[in-house]
Amino acid sequence: MMHFRFAVVVAALSFLIGGCASDDEVAKVRAGWFKGNLHTHSLWSDGDDFPERIVTWYRDHGYQFLAISDHNTDQQGEKWVKYGDVYRKGSGRAADSYLKDFAASAQVRGDRAAGTQEIRLTPFTEYRPLFERPGEFLLIPSEEISDHFEKKPIHMIATNVAEVIKPQGGESVVEVITDNLRAVKEQGERLGRPVLPHLAHPNFEWGITAEEMAEVVEEHFFEIFNGHPLVHQQGDKDHPPVEKMWDIANTLRIAAFHARPLMGMATDDSHNYQVSGMTRAMPGRGWVSIHAKDLSAASLIAAMETGDFYASTGVELANVKYDPAARTLTVDIEPDGRAQFTTSFIGTLADAPPGDIGITLASVEGLKAIYHLTGRELYVRAVVTSDKSVRRPVWEGQKCQAWTQPVGWEARVVSH
Ligand SMILES: [Zn+2]
Ligand SMILES: [Zn+2]
């Protein structure tokens, strides 16, 4: 009887809380697929927790890799934070837990009672070995290059940087993006390591338009989803939603510039780890799942460059396969309790009237969805939407989704 009651209570609670199965549980590790978040903040810039505690959260929530991407820093050198400042940020309890849980490595100086206590922030190279396990968990060095043009913020994440990259500036939005991309490329070539740049939250303060995203054809990645509540994911009456911007940019790229489309990533852009709610930039909202050879920065980046990954806010895919010979795009979805899924195949047709950008070409219910390309598509991509709501929504009624990368464009593109 007790067990029965308990089960009923649990079922009722999970119904009330809702949420996709995959967004708050240790996800099943599927062979060759690695789940991670490439956009995170800590006390090294404007996040409100210590890197070790943030890494612990991600590791314990089923992520296999994480990049803490603080603003304009590579998290090296000496940095101390005043306990009083941390306390005023609402992170006093986090500081206490940090000093207890990481007592062996944490360093303090000064005196709390006298108001002079400071806590040292652990540099990346020192906290990294505390967490990394070959094949199980990887930390990737990163930076959010936080630049601007006039009042428009232009932020770019450089995944796997080795040295801090200063914002390069420029005389237009396009020039700022281009110059920062060049700096990332220069570092990668000079140090002989893969460094992956991606454009963050284009709608943050309406910084970047779809046309500008299209124009910088050297940029290959951007955030189709960013979990920060201020990034206007859904646009407004004067601005398209980020997903529509993706289609506008990709249509322009392929049709006008014969350039490859942007690939879409989902990230948390988490800053707030102490309190939850729709107005907070919480962890666990958006991630990428990458189909890679192994769990290393080089393999993850190589797989992303070939488009072998998807973005997610809670839908897990078992497989995504584009077969150019058979001209099919097949999506297999991982079951999630009784969740129902709708897969929409979105694309732009080469002979479409000018307004018909990113239209729904087909819609399929169930765990498997196949789209047969006709040859008229400039590209096609799939977005899978669950009837379950996400556990940590950014807007009312937000559903769990996954976005696959555009395919079928290869023959129309000359510059890669
Ligand atoms: Zn940013
Ligand atoms: Zn950020």
Image (cartoon, helix red, strand yellow):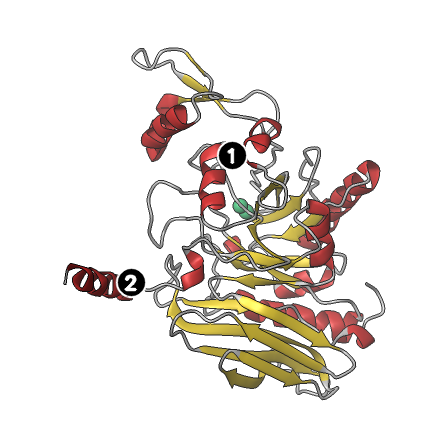
Q: Position of residue 326 (x, y in %)?
A: 75, 84
Name the side, left or right, on which 190 lies relative to 98: right
The vertical placement of 26 against 402, above or below, is: above
- For residue 391, say whether it is visible: yes
- Residue 248's quadrant in the figure? bottom right
Residue at x 44%, y 67% (from the top left corner): 400
Q: Earlier in the sequence, mark 2 or mark 1?
A: 2
Residue 35, by quadrant, is bottom right
Name the mark nearer the viewer: 2 or 1: 2
Q: Nearer the viewer, residue 338 or 139?
A: 338
Which amino acid does the dot numbered 1 rest on?
Ser
Q: Amino acid at mark 2?
A: Ser
Estimate the x, y position of residue 86 in percent, counting from the top left.
Answer: 38, 28
Q: Residue at x 33, y 44 (%)?
A: 275
Pick the quarter of the image with the C terminus.
bottom right
* Residue position marked by numbered label 1 in the rendering: 45
Name the residue tied to disc 2: 14
For this rendering, which residue is in front, 291 or 263? Answer: 291
Left or right: where 128 falls relative to 377: left
Q: Is residue 85 visible?
A: no
Extreme residue toward the right, this view:
414
Q: Is residue 187 left or right of residue 284?
A: right
